[in-house]
Amino acid sequence: MSALVSVDEVVHLTLSGTTRLRARDTPLDDALGCVLAEAVVANEEVPPFANSSMDGFALRSSDTVRAPVALTIIGTALAGRPSSAVVGPGEAIRIMTGAVLPGGADAVCMVERTHLEGANQVVVETPIDVNQFVRAAGGDLRKGTLVFRESTVLGPAHLGVLASLGRPSVSVHPRPRVGVMSTGDELADGPSTLAPGAIRDSNRPTLLGLVRSAGFVAVDLGIVPDDRDALIAALHVGGATCDAVLTSGGVSVGDADLVKEVLAELCGDTMRWLNIAVKPAKPFAFGQLAATNTPVFGLPGNPVSSLVSFELFARPALRQMAGHAALFRPVVRAVADEAFVRETDEKLHVISVVARIDDDGRVHVSSAGAQASHVLSSMARANALALVPDGGGVAAGANVETLLLDADSLGGLSLLLGRAIEVKA
Ligand code: AMP
Ligand code: MG
């Protein structure tokens, strides 16, 4: 391990070392964000019957040609409570939104275009076209038509449509179960007083959060000391209980960096240990545990590095396991609101930035704070990563490719309100 490997090559490595998880029948309740493994065809009509889209009167269009006209009210139809009466010439049925269109009726007059006369007469004030305010059976989905293609990502409205078809469950690629372990003799958990030389484990909460916010199932594999047998045991647990494992620490060139050695032992020929042309997140290991084929991502120990490594190399591969076709975060060409000065070192520099949509409608970025691999607080402030290529850096006002981590926080112009809303404290 000496020559730097490109980011591109490592993305290909992790993508070629992971495969889509086998589809599983999943209750709708648990399928949000999952990827369909079947094509969904409508097995019934939606809506299932012709019904009214207005509160008003169901009638025969032909009766209204010479409106205004008085019709005799012969019944009432409510949503879920159809009227059994049949509308004959000169008759109408009071009808509410969503109620079945009664037999004999071919249109609805909205209540606002009528007035009552006596106890059981309604005057329809204007001529009503056939099918006016009638929602046809199958007007949303016709029985037998393709509703969703395989590989569709299920959002809230997809779940609603599936429910409207009466589907209790659907075949999807399951969310990967992703094990997360921190490695290092110096790591402590919880609020206790720190022993000399100890630090608190921040990678595990970060990585568990990244896994969850990507929509996957996070499995906490705990803190593992820099000990060969302990690492082997923890990786066995990860392999037996998870679809993929993330480790942090122990993949650099220090004396206690045992993770790479243990992975070489457990992964055999599939294990790669790399120096990547990126800063932060240079050291990285990847392989599949021979016993279970479980992919293991050996992320670096520095907190910012492990997060960047997850974003660049683990997240796309985990999305592939989840069945997604779109593997990557959106990258936009943003305006640098300040200079990002750097030296030439053959690496891509990843800068934590605050991105926002400015009045010009473009994304603008500025540094989120000190840029060092141990300064996680800058990353906590950031909502994007500026990708500054090798060279002299980016001048203020110039463009910089920026990977968006959180579109919700970009703010910007509001079509609804004319300008951005100030957030109340
Ligand atoms: P390593 O890659 O194991 O040599 O770790 C690199 C640096 O990251 C060291 O300063 C470690 O103390 C630190 N580090 C490793 N793991 C963690 C963790 N889980 N939380 C916070 N810092 C860590
Ligand atoms: Mg370590």
Image (spheres, grey):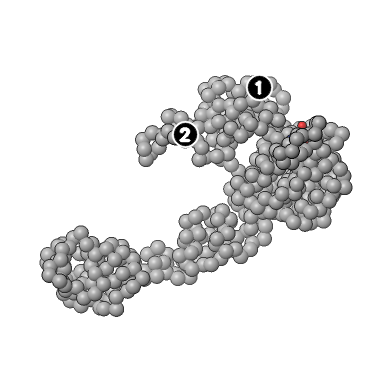
Residue 319 in the image, given as x and y percentages of width and height:
63, 49
Residue 387 in the image, given as x and y percentages of width and height:
62, 31
Which label was assigned to residue 177?
none
Q: Quick check: 146 above or below 263?
A: below
User: Left or right of 325: which side holds 9?
Assistant: right
Name the residue: 53% across, 59% down: 149
Q: Secondary structure at mark 2?
A: loop
Residue 132 in the image, given as x and y percentages of width and height:
25, 63
**Can residue 387 be seen from the camera position used here?**
no
Residue that mark 1 sits on: 342
Residue contact at pointers 2 and 1, CB within 8 angstroms: no
Q: Nearer the viewer, mark 2 or mark 1?
A: 2
Residue 217 in the image, given as x and y percentages of width and height:
65, 52
Distance CA(mark 2)–CA(mark 1): 37 Å
Name the residue: 32% across, 71% down: 100
Q: Quick check: 320 above or below 385?
A: below
Going by the numbered disc 1, the residue's amino acid type is Arg
Comes first in the chain, label 2 or label 1: 1
Q: Secondary structure at mark 1?
A: loop
Mark 2, other Cα within 10 Å: few <14 / some 14–19 / many ≥20: few
Name the residue: 42% across, 33% down: 422
Going by the numbered disc 2, the residue's amino acid type is Ala
**Where is residue 348, by image quadrant?**
top right
Which label was assigned to residue 425?
2
User: Left or right of 299: which side holds 232?
Assistant: right
Mark 1, other Cα within 10 Å: few <14 / some 14–19 / many ≥20: some
Quadrant containing the N terminus in the rendered view: top right
